[in-house]
Image: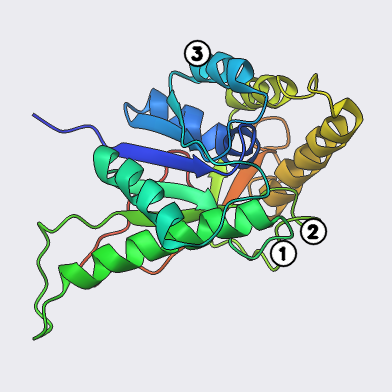
Amino acid sequence: MAFKKRVVVLAAHTDDAEFGAGGVMVNMIRAGYEVVVGNMVPGGAETVGRTSAALTGAAVEWLGFEAQAIEDSPAAFAVVESFLDRHKPDLILTHWPIDEHADHRVTGSLTIRYVDARQKIRIDKDGGIHPRRYCPQLVFYEVISGKQSKCFRPDRFVDLDRDVFALKKRLMRLYTGTPMTGYMKSVYAHHLLMLEFRARESGACRHGEIDRGIWAEAFVSYPLARGQQKLALPGER
């Protein structure tokens, strides 16, 4: 019996997972993966987050941090470590750590610390590889590239079929009714442009395919531990 792959999407705020990785989340759930969204900051959108989870089939949890107050500290790392150890995902998707927003930067940094620690215990002092040691893979997503995510140079692209793109738009629009309506509408429009640009960058928008492959999400892979085989992302080009 094959075991389901487990994925955690770790997000600073309740909307970041949908904007940064909503399409691949849908692809993974449809492919039979177990997906958990971990939101660092509850904010004021818990109900919207649960609606999003219901639409995608992902589970959702909040880690209890306060906005603008996430620090790369031993206490914060202990919370993230406990959450990830409890789920033991095969794959973690989180923020690209070069970001204008401090919460995004720290979320990415804490996740890197977690993965680095597990990569080290996979290799013993003589350089031997222990493949049964728990060691998740890490992939970064982007949020408002050019404004928040900086220097993001993707090496992985996930095509979004028309129905997945429609659901991603619906997920993103859940958040345009928050108190920052004007700002969130701008974020929504920016992400639509990102999805179109990434499709062209990935080669999905080739002649003859203009009507069926014109949206893509982009990601950056963190280096694998020795002996690891890269897990494919459903829909990856």
| Between discs 3 and 2, the one toward the N terminus | 3
Residue 202 appears left or right of 221? right
Q: Is residue 158 visible?
A: yes
The answer to whether the residue labelled 1 contacts the one labelled 3, judged by CB atoms less than 8 Å apart, is no
In the rendered view, would you say 11 is above or below 113?
Answer: above
Q: Are marks 1 and 2 in contact (CB under 8 Å)?
A: yes
Q: Which x, y percent locates residue 88?
A: 25, 43
Q: Amino acid at mark 1?
A: Lys
Residue 103 position in % (x across, y down): 63, 52
Image location of residue 33, percent across then percent down = 33, 31
Q: Quadrant of the N terminus?
A: top left
- Residue 71 spot, x, y in % from top left: 56, 58
Instruction: Please state which amino acid type lies under the numbered disc 3.
Output: Ala
Q: Secondary structure at mark 1?
A: loop
Element carrying mark 3: helix
Q: Nearer the viewer, residue 149 or 181?
A: 181
Query: Looking at this view, is 125 or 103 the one in front?
Result: 103
Which residue is label 2 attached to?
146
Q: Name the residue that disc number 3 marks.
A: 54
Tell me what residue is drawn at x 57 percent, y 33 percent: 22
Identify the residue shown where x is 40% and y is 48%.
Answer: 80
| Residue at the spot of label 1 | 150
Alpha-carbon span between mark 3 and mark 2: 31 Å
143 displayed left or right of 115: right
Crowd band around label 1 with a 10 angstrom C-alpha radius: few (<14), some (14–19), many (20+): some
